[in-house]
Image (cartoon, rainbow, N blue to C red):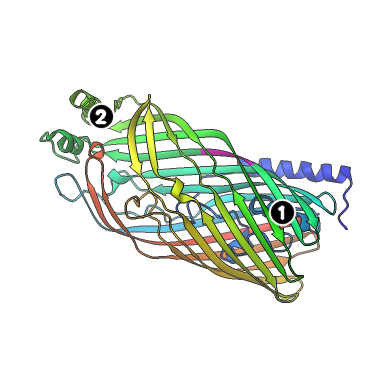
């Protein structure tokens, strides 16, 4: 069965550690492509199956993060690297108005619209017939939206970047030939950048009735915060009731992050001075320094759980299904503070969401395999919180791909997924301190994913 000497395991571990270091050095900002800013941690075959089946398919090392219990059924050590490019589209249709009810000047660009890459690395090594260990580098949460500073919705956001990179270590134990359990820990590095234009004249008019013309003295607020390391845990089980069926469940904990950094103001000097004077007119307003200052925010990535099923009809055809739940209802608001004062408090009020997917593989020959799947991914956003930063809507998933076994040691997969998103309505009124403008309309969204995976079987 699975027997590996200590020297060989040491060599495998050294190679995996080196590969993790290389991939982490090239980690880049990513774009949201699941509910809100959650990202599937799948390989190319998983994207092609519309994210159905989790990591229950034969020898899928993404199990090291998704459901470590599956590793105890692997036939040998594996190392896998995935490069995925994601391109969401979000075009606004509607109008934005200032505090006087006049149209906001500027164009209407697509805040997304380009492919952005991100890496995924996983390894798994059976130690003997019962025990296995594994690890991964994944990007479970990410977002990047970028509008120019002159667009008509600038007072609701210009640029937003969020990146959570997780490094995990996990283990699995096979209780018997039908049941296994697994657990792991992860360290997560999170950083965020949030930029928006402020309308100080509009704010002065909304708060104090001062007769100043809106949109004349714009000030850009840039916030950069990060958390070097936070920890979480995950675990699951795999049950094989028959030779053809495999069932698995997994759970990933919430990861708590207190992000800290700084904010800076750019633009009109008179606008910055007006913001600085606001607390003198109303002591309840925050002190916003024209020279910037410290900033912090509490940002907890939500817990999620998945139930996966796989049925092998024969040696060539396998079909899988997945139901995934994410605890988005824990994301109530996003509050930015500085020196103990609340600068901006944005109500989010997300709701829990579910992903439903069915997909599978058909083995054409010993070398070639087809992947395909369909799914439906709910959005956690609502009409209260949806804005240009995350113009998210429920999406229908369609995936297709192909796998090629080059040799007994090397295989490749290519996956493509398109996401059909319903028009997502947006009805917002900015807080008075942000200018009291309004945005009414909808976003026309869609998304494309292209993914390539290479897997080495030792």
Instruction: Please tell me which residue lies in front, 113 or 432.
Output: 432
Q: Could one spot residue 133 in this view of the protein?
A: yes
Q: Main secondary structure of the magenta part?
A: strand
Residue beneath disc 1: 69
Q: Which residues are magenta?
A: 186-190
**Residue 457 appears in the rendering:** no
Above or below: residue 214 compared with residue 295: below
Q: Residues within 10 Å of mark 1 (few under 14, many from 20)?
A: many
Residue at 31%, 36% (x, y): give it.
220
Q: Quadrant location of the C terminus?
A: bottom right
Q: Which residue is mark 2?
A: 285
The image shows residue 370 at horizontal and vertical percentages of: 65, 72
Mark 2: few/some/many CA within 10 Å (<14, 14-19, 20+): some
Image coords of residue 319 (percent x, y): 65, 72
Left or right: where does residue 374 sit relative to residue 438? right
In the foreground, 200 or 72: 72
Q: Secondary structure at mark 1?
A: helix
Alpha carbon distance from label 2 to label 1: 52 Å
- Look at discs 2 and 1 and give the one toward the viewer: 1
Helix, strand, or loop for circle 2? loop
């Amino acid at each position: 069965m699975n027997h590996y000497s200590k020297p060989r395991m040491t060599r495998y571990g050294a190679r995996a550690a080196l590969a993790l270091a290389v991939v982490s050095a090239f980690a880049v900002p990513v774009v949201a492509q699941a509910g809100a800013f959650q990202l599937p941690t799948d390989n190319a075959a998983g994207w092609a199956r519309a994210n159905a089946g989790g990591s229950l398919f034969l020898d899928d090392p993404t199990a090291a993060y998704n459901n470590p219990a599956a590793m105890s059924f692997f036939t040998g050590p594996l190392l896998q690297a995935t490069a995925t490019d994601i391109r969401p589209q979000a075009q606004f249709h509607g109008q934005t108005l200032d505090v006087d009810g006049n149209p906001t000047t500027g164009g209407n660009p697509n805040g997304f619209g380009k492919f952005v890459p991100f890496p995924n690395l996983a390894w798994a090594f059976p130690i003997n017939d019962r025990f296995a260990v594994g690890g991964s580098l994944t990007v479970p949460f990410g977002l990047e939206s970028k509008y120019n500073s002159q667009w008509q919705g600038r007072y609701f956001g210009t640029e937003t970047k969020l990146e959570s990179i997780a490094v995990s270590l996990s283990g699995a134990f096979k209780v018997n030939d039908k049941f296994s359990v697994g657990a792991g820990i992860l360290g997560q590095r999170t950083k965020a950048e949030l930029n928006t234009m402020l309308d100080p004249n509009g704010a002065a008019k909304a708060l104090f009735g001062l007769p100043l013309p809106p949109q004349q003295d714009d000030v850009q607020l840039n916030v950069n915060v990060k958390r070097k390391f936070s920890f979480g845990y995950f675990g699951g089980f795999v049950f094989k009731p028959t030779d053809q069926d495999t069932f698995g469940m997994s759970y990933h904990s919430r990861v708590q992050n207190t992000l800290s950094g700084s904010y800076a103001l750019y633009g009109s000097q008179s606008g910055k001075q007006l913001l600085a004077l606001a607390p003198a007119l109303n002591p309840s307003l925050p002190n916003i320094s024209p020279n910037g200052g410290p900033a912090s925010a509490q940002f907890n990535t939500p817990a999620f759980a998945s139930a996966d099923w796989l049925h092998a009809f024969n040696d060539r055809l396998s079909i899988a299904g997945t139901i995934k739940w994410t605890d988005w209802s824990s994301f109530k608001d996003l509050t930015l503070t500085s020196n103990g004062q609340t600068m901006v408090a944005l109500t989010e009020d997300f709701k829990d969401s579910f992903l439903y997917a069915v997909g599978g593989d058909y083995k054409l020959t010993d070398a070639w395999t087809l992947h395909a799947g369909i799914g439906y991914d709910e959005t956690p956003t609502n009409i209260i919180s949806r804005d240009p930063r995350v113009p998210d809507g429920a999406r229908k998933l369609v995936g297709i791909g192909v796998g090629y076994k080059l040799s007994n040691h090397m295989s490749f997969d290519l996956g493509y997924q398109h996401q059909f998103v319903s028009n997502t309505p947006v009805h917002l009124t900015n807080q008075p301190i942000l200018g009291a403008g309004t945005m009414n309309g909808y976003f026309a969204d869609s998304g494309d994913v292209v993914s390539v995976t290479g897997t080495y079987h030792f």
